[in-house]
Amino acid sequence: MSELISKYLPNVANLGWTGDSGWGTALFQTIFMTFWPAVIGGLLGLIFGLALVLTKDGGILANRAWFNLCDKIVSFFRAIPFIILLAFIAPFTQLVVGTQIGTTAALVPLSLGVFPFFARQVEVALESVDRGKVEAAQALGSTNWDIIFDVYLSEARSELVRVSTVTLISLIGLTAMAGAIGAGGLGNTAIAYGYNRFNNDVTVVATFLVLILVLIVQLVGDWLAKKLNHQVR
Amino acid sequence: MAYIIDLDHVSVTFGDLHAVSDVTIKVEKGDVYGVVGYSGAGKSTLVRTINLLQLPTAGTIEVAGTTLFKDGQAQVTSKELQEKRRNIGMIFQHFNLLNEATVIDNVAFALKHSDLDDDAIEAKCYELLDLVGLKAKAENYPVQLSGGEQQRVAIARALANDPEILISDEATSALDPQNTNQILDLLKRLNKELGLTIVLITHEMDAVKKIANKIAVMQHGQVVEQGKLRDVYLRPKAELTRQFVGGSLAAAETLKAFNLGTLGENEQLYQVVFSAQTVTKSVILELYKQVGVDVSMLYGNIEVLGDEPVGTMFILVTGDEQQQAQVESLLKSYQVEVTKVDGGILA
């Protein structure tokens, strides 16, 4: 196997598995840069998405001021192109993780880059929950926490998994840009070691690996969304 | 007399729209109170003020001895309101069950804040499902059930906290006639066996006729007529009520079809209403025998209101004033309700 790779994909083999430019390192960096922002950005997105639905007119905590605030924050971060966001929030990144470059530094802009996208997706997912179910819960004397957990999040769970899948795939896409601040990852391998050095085989292999990651996320996401859904017969 | 639901001069305004204007409805314990009207009449908005799902703009709301709303604001904290709402079950047109929860979990959801422990909650859920005849489907998901079954689960859920009041918001409107009857029978049984007070909103007169004892008819946010079902049903005053009741419309049309024009001298038209106890007597024969008047029957019909068969007849009596008075007193002595009807109805 390794002989075959050395023979037909020499530049791919040259990068090795470990080390700064290694494939294993790049793969780990991509997964690392997908996982933590997914957790942090996901949580932020969920909170903002929930806040948008709950504070909207007719929501259980309807409050125009809070709604506008959340809405503006989400729209603001959503409007900034990610590659610019990386640079734009560098001072903030410095403040949070103590450095502006490297894989860890990329976690901050990635989290902030993915949360508004996810917040909008969560908003749509939660709005698919029939208002009548919320009303029925209110009529039963449910508390707002009951309504958030047992009605909104529980009833929309399949839809939430679906939008999480979409978000995760889009996040994998964003990690490719994190190379711009020296964060490494498969995207960086494809550009820095592949495209810039005219090593097309590296670019192709890096792309292929990203595709496999996306495919795994998609398959697991679809399976889970289907398993959790009892809305149709 | 303390009312279990006392809506006093309640209004609900959305901007310029007067969804409910100055409505007063008083419901006694054990009543099945029907609120009928076309869609957009304000029925749903009105009944949602009972559990403050809809805050009124003005008026006073008292439910089971607690003042919920007065002087333009809610009189209970949100925690108190949550407690209070557990005493007011509600069912809806589209059932509003949690689709991602099993039947038993849907019922258990209502008991989340009860004092019962988990075992007792489970036992109670099965008891409720048994009551609505769905014990066997406890582990199913709502989508696996028919509409009627889903509504029965919703009823079990609404009854979980042993409420004194059940609000039914068009609960049978999305169901076929067979399921509608099953649900209505169930509601009637709950009213009789548990003493449950029911407020039934519907646009179907048949549903009200079947189980209600009192009725309010709504139009443009106002109650145009209210009272005992029997009175409103048999002698509707408002035009809208006549449309809903239908029966009296049929009577009017039949009478017109006779083409009698106006009443002659010594002729008087009567509406005669009799119930189960009096049907057996041959009242009309007695009129002829005892008073000696000529009686023609122009229209007759028997309806079942609640459990009770109620007959309506329009009779034309020919006799002088003294005989007419005798006719009226004789009919009354048989516990038959008799009302003079203006001859204009024949034209």
Image (cartoon, coloured by chain):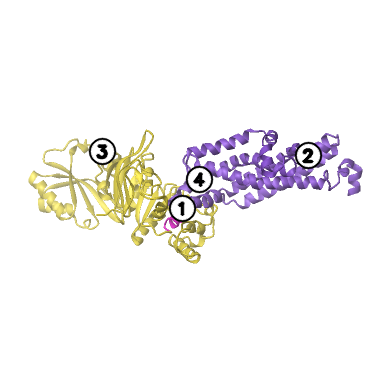
The residue to which callout 1 is attached is: A142
The letter of the yellow chain is: B
Q: Looking at the image, is A172 positioned above or below residue B199?
A: above
Q: Is residue B256 visible?
A: yes
Q: Position of residue B41 (x, y in %)?
A: 36, 39
Q: Marks 3 and 2: in contact by CB < 8 Å?
A: no
As shown in the figure, which amino acid type bears the numbered disc 2? Asn
Q: Marks 4 and 2: in contact by CB < 8 Å?
A: no
- Residue range corresponding to the magenta coloring: B151-159
Q: Could you tell me how far apart the alpha carbons at marks 1 and 3 are, in whole angstroms?
A: 58 Å
In magenta stretch: residue A30: no
Same chain under badges 2 and 3? The reply is no
Label at residue A188: 2
Q: Position of residue B328 (x, y in %)?
A: 13, 49
| Front of the two marks 1 and 3 | 1
As shown in the figure, which amino acid type bears the numbered disc 1? Ser
